[in-house]
Protein backbone atom coordinates (compact mmCIF):
# COMPACT_ATOMS: atom_id res chain seq x y z
CA UNK A 1 0.00 0.00 0.00
CA UNK A 2 1.41 3.38 -1.00
CA UNK A 3 0.78 6.39 1.16
CA UNK A 4 1.13 9.79 -0.41
CA UNK A 5 1.82 12.44 2.17
CA UNK A 6 0.28 15.75 1.17
CA UNK A 7 2.39 18.65 2.37
CA UNK A 8 0.19 21.40 3.75
CA UNK A 9 0.68 24.94 4.96
CA UNK A 10 3.69 27.11 4.16
CA UNK A 11 5.91 24.14 3.31
CA UNK A 12 3.65 23.34 0.34
CA UNK A 13 5.18 26.39 -1.38
CA UNK A 14 8.78 25.21 -1.01
CA UNK A 15 9.17 23.32 -4.33
CA UNK A 16 7.80 26.32 -6.22
CA UNK A 17 10.01 28.74 -4.28
CA UNK A 18 13.13 26.70 -5.05
CA UNK A 19 12.18 26.43 -8.73
CA UNK A 20 11.28 30.11 -9.18
CA UNK A 21 14.17 31.66 -7.26
CA UNK A 22 16.91 29.09 -7.87
CA UNK A 23 17.98 28.64 -4.26
CA UNK A 24 17.05 26.08 -1.60
CA UNK A 25 14.69 27.21 1.16
CA UNK A 26 17.59 26.83 3.62
CA UNK A 27 19.20 29.81 1.86
CA UNK A 28 16.11 31.94 2.45
CA UNK A 29 16.01 30.91 6.12
CA UNK A 30 19.60 32.15 6.46
CA UNK A 31 18.55 35.41 4.80
CA UNK A 32 15.68 35.69 7.28
CA UNK A 33 18.08 35.11 10.18
CA UNK A 34 19.69 38.43 9.23
CA UNK A 35 16.39 40.25 9.88
CA UNK A 36 15.05 38.13 12.72
CA UNK A 37 14.51 41.20 14.91
CA UNK A 38 11.87 42.52 12.48
CA UNK A 39 8.13 41.79 12.62
CA UNK A 40 6.50 39.24 10.32
CA UNK A 41 5.27 41.69 7.68
CA UNK A 42 8.55 43.62 7.80
CA UNK A 43 10.37 40.39 6.95
CA UNK A 44 7.89 39.72 4.13
CA UNK A 45 8.46 43.23 2.77
CA UNK A 46 12.23 42.70 3.00
CA UNK A 47 12.07 39.53 0.89
CA UNK A 48 9.79 41.24 -1.62
CA UNK A 49 11.82 44.42 -2.04
CA UNK A 50 15.39 43.17 -1.60
CA UNK A 51 15.05 39.74 -3.23
CA UNK A 52 12.06 40.16 -5.58
CA UNK A 53 10.15 37.27 -4.02
CA UNK A 54 6.38 37.28 -4.52
CA UNK A 55 4.12 38.04 -1.58
CA UNK A 56 2.73 34.51 -1.14
CA UNK A 57 6.16 32.91 -1.28
CA UNK A 58 7.68 35.49 1.07
CA UNK A 59 4.82 35.08 3.54
CA UNK A 60 5.18 31.28 3.47
CA UNK A 61 8.93 31.45 4.13
CA UNK A 62 8.50 33.88 7.03
CA UNK A 63 5.59 31.98 8.59
CA UNK A 64 7.41 28.65 8.44
CA UNK A 65 10.70 30.09 9.69
CA UNK A 66 9.09 31.90 12.62
CA UNK A 67 7.08 28.80 13.63
CA UNK A 68 10.19 26.61 13.43
CA UNK A 69 12.18 29.04 15.60
CA UNK A 70 9.49 28.99 18.30
CA UNK A 71 9.32 25.19 18.39
Image (cartoon, helix red, strand yellow):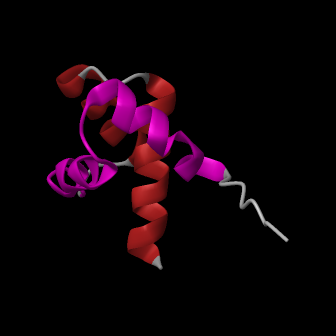
Looking at the rendered image, the quarter that the N terminus falls into is bottom right
Residue 48 location in percent, x, y?
31, 24
Q: Image quarter for residue 18? A: top left
Tally of numbered tags: 0
Q: Is residue 68 above or below residue 53?
A: below
Residue drawn at (26%, 46%) of the image:
28
Main SS of the magenta part reads helix
Q: Is residue 19 above or below residue 14?
A: above
Q: Does residue 49 show up magenta in the picture?
A: no
Magenta residues (range): 9-36
Residue drawn at (59%, 46%) of the image:
12
Residue drawn at (40%, 59%) of the image:
65
Q: Residue furthest front?
A: 1
Q: Image quarter for residue 43? A: top left
Residue 46 location in percent, x, y?
25, 32
Of residues 62 and 40, which is closer to you in this image? Answer: 62
Q: Residue furthest right?
A: 1
Q: Does residue 33 show up magenta in the picture?
A: yes
Amino acid sequence: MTTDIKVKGPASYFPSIEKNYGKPVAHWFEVLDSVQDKKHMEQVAFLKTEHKIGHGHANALVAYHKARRKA
